[in-house]
Amino acid sequence: MNTADQYLKTIYVVQDSEDGPASTGSIADALGVSPASANEMIGKLEERGLAEHEKYKGVKLTDDGIVRARDALQTYCIIERFLANVLAVEDFQSEARELEAVIDDTVAERLDTIIDRQPECPDCFDPETDACACLEIAPAPVEPEQQ
């Protein structure tokens, strides 16, 4: 997955959560980049026919952009599930974000054979938790209230 795919994935998730075009600011915030950097990449995605950007309204993915975004999201879920469920990596989310840029389709397909991906993937991704809903991890313990 490359940087363009990370942007496509983010636009897809933001677009879904905002129920319409994704704002450049929301995309930049989600990726931890400046709005200028986000605008630059959005322009490149638009040139490639993967996104449509209307000034002051936001970014919408084209049909081709949606396909690539869903593939990128599926790869991210595969990486998360492998790290959490197979390797028991505690900080699997930050590790998955680091790895998603360097894992290619061949490696993702091989990891997929290990994790037994669910048919609902990538719709299993929960933007609220920034994680695949199919993770087999125990919820974090709740701290008792101090009085």
Image: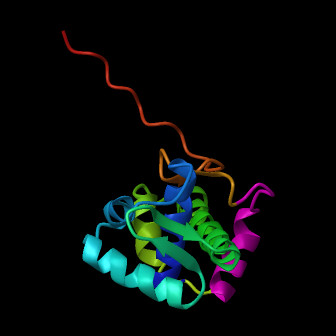
Residue appearing at x 66%, y 71% in the figure: 66
In which image quadrant can residue 93 be found? bottom left
| Pick the front one: 130 or 64 | 64
Residue range highlighted in magenta:
105-121
| Pick the front one: 143 or 22 | 22
Q: Is residue 145 left or right of residue 10?
A: left
Q: Position of residue 5 (x, y in %)?
A: 53, 79
| Pick the front one: 104 or 50 | 50
Q: Is residue 52 visible?
A: yes
Q: Position of residue 78 (x, y in %)?
A: 63, 67
Q: Is residue 31 left or right of residue 7?
A: left
Residue appearing at x 45%, y 88% in the figure: 44
Outermost residue, top direction? 147
Magenta span: predominant SS is: helix
Q: Position of residue 145 (x, y in %)?
A: 27, 16
User: Is 56 located above or below residue 6 in the figure?
Assistant: above
Whether the magenta-drawn stretch holds residue 64 is answered as: no
Residue appearing at x 54%, y 83% in the figure: 1
Q: Is residue 53 left or right of residue 143?
A: right
Q: Position of residue 49 (x, y in %)?
A: 60, 86
User: Is 128 located above or below residue 40 in the figure?
Assistant: above
| Pick the front one: 85 or 94 | 94
Q: Is residue 2 visible?
A: no
Which quarter of the rendering shows the C terminus?
top left
Residue appearing at x 56%, y 63% in the figure: 12
